[in-house]
Amino acid sequence: MYLQGKHILLGVTGGIAAYKACELTRRLRDAGAIVRVVMTRAALEFVTPLSFQALSGHPVRTDLFDEQAEAGMGHIELARWADAVLVAPCSADFMARLAAGRADDLLSTLCLASDAPLAIAPAMNRQMWANAATQANRDALGARGVSIFGPASGEQACGETGEGRMLEAAELVERLSALFATGALAGRTVLISAGPTREALDPVRYLSNRSSGRMGYALAEAAREAGARVLLVSGPVALPTPRGVERIEVESAAQMFDAVMARIDEVDLFIGAAAVADYRPAAVAGQKIKKTASQLTLELERTPDILAAVAAREPRPFVVGFAAETQDLEAHARDKLSRKHLDMIAANDVSAGRGFDVEDNALEVFWADGHASLPQQSKARLARELVALIAGRMSGA
Ligand code: PMT
C-alpha cells in the first residue's frame, strides 16, 4: 500500500535469479510504484535490458559513461529521483563492492550517491552466502542501515539445497513497502490543510493563488505512512486523494475555517500547508459584473486566520504553520511563529517559480529554540523528512 507513486530504483546484478527481477518489476508497478531499472554488466549475461524496458516502461541504464543516457536523466539526478533503491538479485560480488564503498560502475555509484533507503535481496550459491567474507559484508551493510531481504532457503539453480535463494517477488514487494511505514505518528490523528482557496467576486469569477496542493497532499501521504489517521481539508486542486486519507473539500477561506474547526477537537497535530487567501471581496456580486466602467476598484476584507485560531484553542493540538516568503525568510517566519503562537513553522522561498506549483521544494523549519534545513528535493521526500521532524518534536526528542 505504501508503494503508490514511489520512485523505485531497481538494481539488477549478475546471477540466475536475475530473471525473477522481471516479475518483481511487474509486481512493483502493480503496487503503484514507478520503477527505473539499472543493470550491471554481469546482469546483461542473464536478461536483456529490453525485457526490463518493456516491463518498467522506462529505458534501462547499464553504463556510467553513456553520454546519451546522461543527457536524459543523469546518474546524480537518478540517485536523487529514487525514494528507495532495491538491488535484487544482489550477488556476492555486488555485496562486497557495496561494503567496500566502490563506485566502479553505474549501480554502485548510484548506491553511494543516493540518500534514499537502500535494500538488497542477496541471491547466490549457499557456500558463497555462508562464506565468512560474505557474512562479514552482510554485517557491515546491516550496521550501516542497509535493509537485507533474505535470502531464503531451498533448492538452488546449481542443484544444491540451502540458504541463498532470492526471496519471491511478492515478499520483496511487501518488505520494500514496509520500509515506508515508519510508525512515527502511530496512534495520532493529524489534520492537514492543503491547496489554494477561491474567494468569489461574482458567480463566475474569484481571487485565488497558484497553490497546486502538492505540498499538503505529500504531507498527508507521509503522515499516513507514519501511521497516523489523516484528515485532509483541501481547497480545489487536481490531485487524487492519497490512499487511506479522509479528504474534506472546501472552496473559500471561510469554508476552510469551518471545516477545520469542525474536526479540530479530534486531532493531535494540525499542519497548515494551505495557501489561504488573506483577503476576500468585501461583497460578492449576485450577478456577473458587467464591463461598463473603464476602471473597477475592488474592496477587500480580511479572511479569518485559521492557523492562529487553531493555536488559540485550549486545549490545542501541536500546531505547525507554513510561511511562504519572497524575502527575509527567517525573520518573517520567526515573526509568524511567535505572533501566531505556533509550535513549529516551515518556511519556503516562493520567489520566481519556487514553492508554488512545482515538483520540488526546500524548507527552513523553525521552533522556539531550534532550526533545521531540509534541502531542495521532491515534495514527497521533503514531506517525509518534515513529518519525521515533527514526530520527533511531538515526542520531545
Ligand atoms: O500547493 P503547492 O503548489 O505544493 O505549494 C506549496 C505552498 C508554497 C503553497 C506551501 O509550501 C506553503 O507555503 N503554504 C502556505 C502558504 C501561505 O499561505 O503562507 P503565508 O505565509 O501567507 O501564511 C502563513 C500560514 O498561515 C500558513 O500556514 C497558512 O496556511 C496560514 N493562514 C494564512 C491565512 C489565513 N487566512 N489563514 C491561515 O491559516
Image (cartoon, rainbow, N blue to C red):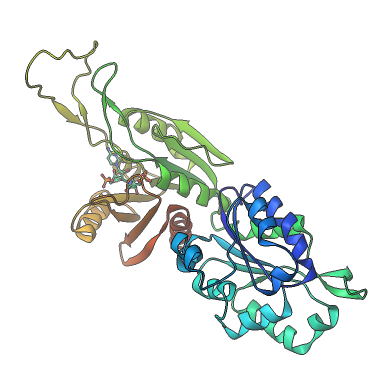
Front-most of residues 8 and 18? 18
Q: Residue furthest front?
A: 68
State left or right for residue 204 relative to residue 258. left
The relative height of residue 31 versus residue 40 in the rendered view (above or below) is: above
Picture quarter containing residue 135? Answer: bottom right
- Of all residues shown, which one is farthest toward the top? 287
Q: Position of residue 2 (x, y in %)?
A: 61, 51
Task: Please count the marks in the image.
Answer: 0
Q: Residue furthest bottom?
A: 132
Can the viewer see residue 121 in this picture? no
Q: Is residue 226 left or right of residue 1?
A: left
Q: Is residue 73 visible in this depiction of the protein?
A: yes
Q: At x 39% / y 33%, what residue is drawn?
A: 235
Quarter occupied by residue 260: top left
Q: Residue at x 37, y 51 (%)?
A: 320
Residue 333, percent from left and from top: 25, 55
Q: Quadrant of ligand 1?
A: top left
Frontmost residue, 58 versus 151: 58
Q: Which residue does the image show at 25% across and 17% down from the upper left? A: 202
Between 378 and 382, the one lying in front of the other is: 378
Q: Residue furthest left?
A: 294
**Residue 75 x, y percent position in the rendering:** 49, 68
Q: Position of residue 168 (x, y in %)?
A: 79, 60
Q: Quadrant of residue 139?
A: bottom right
Q: Does 116 appear above or below 326?
A: below
